[in-house]
Image (cartoon, rainbow, N blue to C red):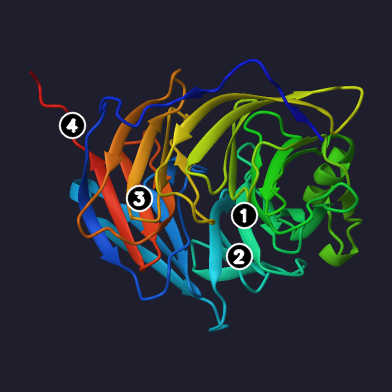
Amino acid sequence: MAKTALGCEPVVGSLSSSKKREYRVTNRLQEGKRPLYAVVFNFIDSRYFNVFATVGGNRVTVYQCLEGGVIAVLQSYIDEDKEESFYTVSWACNIDRTPFVVAGGINGIIRIIDAGNEKIHRSFVGHGDSINEIRTQPLKPSLIVSASKDESVRLWNVHTGICILIFAGAGGHRNEVLSVDFHPSDMYRIASCGMDNTVKIWSMKEFWTYVEKSFTWTDLPSKFPTKYVQFPVFIAPVHSNYVDCNRWLGDFVLSKSVDNEIVLWEPKMKEQSPGEGSVDILQKYPVPECDIWFIKFSCDFHYHSIAIGNREGKIFVWELQSSPPVLIAKLSHSQSKSPIRQTAMSFDGSTILSCCEDGTIWRWDVIAASPS
């Protein structure tokens, strides 16, 4: 277990700092009665940067953000099981660039939906309990990773339908895994976090031949020699409660718990002794009234800024790469009172979407500065 380094105090952002950008509400949709748990833009394919997906209940819906605040419904997939409740959605694609919407939830089944024909391309069964998050490898977008209540993380190939690796076992999580993320440039590395209060960093380096083999496998997916990765290369005790969202920022990690802040920290690994090392906590981004779990933040494509909702329906937008952190905007609307489960920032950060417990989707657009 890594230790938290002493000496350097983290830099905490001020909530009273100047507004750098102004946003206004341009649309509000009531999708249904059931809570919406996830919303995500498609950053995988430049043809569809303005397309996003939401999940709530047994429904996956795909929309397009158009000019003037317009949100157009493109398609809707309703799961055959009325009891399904999707918690997470991600974009992926086949090796021929066919866009896929990937969703998972309470049933523990991952649905790979072909966005071209609205039909199920594949269903992945393997997790022993509900799925809390799915993420896509940005450099190889037919690889996805899933975090589950069954205390494991799994790596899948949507092209061949194979479960390649299972991150679980002796050094694995000891409670629900709530979030997982691929490193943006190091293909071998992922980070996961959960209800055991830890963030774990895993390496696939010694298993990479299996990842490559998964693309050319022609036998039944069930016959693939799925491997267990039992030990993470780093375990970080950054938080003292559930950790429900983690994302890489270069080699640094952004993570949040239920204590009204997002933390930016650096894992300092000891090459000789896996799992050990120290944590340098660099910055803290305060988020008031963000003390319930399963609230996820999002960033624009280049990770310039980060947006997070809270349990009162407000959104805080922070500049990520300034020290001390600068609050770009605080977004609130008299009718937005429901907990925001997730935000989605558009490619350049000019549009922010939020999906809420009351089944609403809110769209905020940046107000262009008028020429002086």
Q: Could you tell me residue 224's position as x and y percent?
A: 88, 58
In the figure, 278 relative to 108: above or below?
above
Q: Badges 1 and 4: C-beta atoms under 8 Å apart?
A: no
Instruction: Residue at 29% x, 55% y: name it.
Output: 362
> Which type of secondary structure does the marked residue at label 1 adopt?
strand
Instruction: Residue at 81% x, 45% y: name it.
Output: 211
Q: Amino acid at mark 3?
A: Leu
The answer to whether one can see residue 289 in this image is yes
Q: Badges 2 and 3: C-beta atoms under 8 Å apart?
A: no
Q: Badges 2 and 1: C-beta atoms under 8 Å apart?
A: yes
Q: Nearer the viewer, residue 255 or 15?
A: 15
> Which type of secondary structure does the marked residue at label 4 adopt?
loop
Q: Amino acid at mark 1?
A: Ile
Residue underneath mark 2: 104
Q: Badges 4 and 2: C-beta atoms under 8 Å apart?
A: no
Q: Amino acid at mark 4?
A: Ala
Report, in whole angstroms, how far the alpha carbon at label 3 lies from the one at label 1. 19 Å
Task: Answer with mark 4 or mark 2, whichever residue precedes in sequence.
Answer: 2
Residue sticking out furthest to the left: 372
Residue underneath mark 4: 368
Q: Nearer the viewer, residue 155 or 171?
A: 171
In the figure, 177 relative to 257: above or below?
below
> Which type of secondary structure does the marked residue at label 3 adopt?
strand
Residue 123 as seen in the image, left or right of residue 354: right
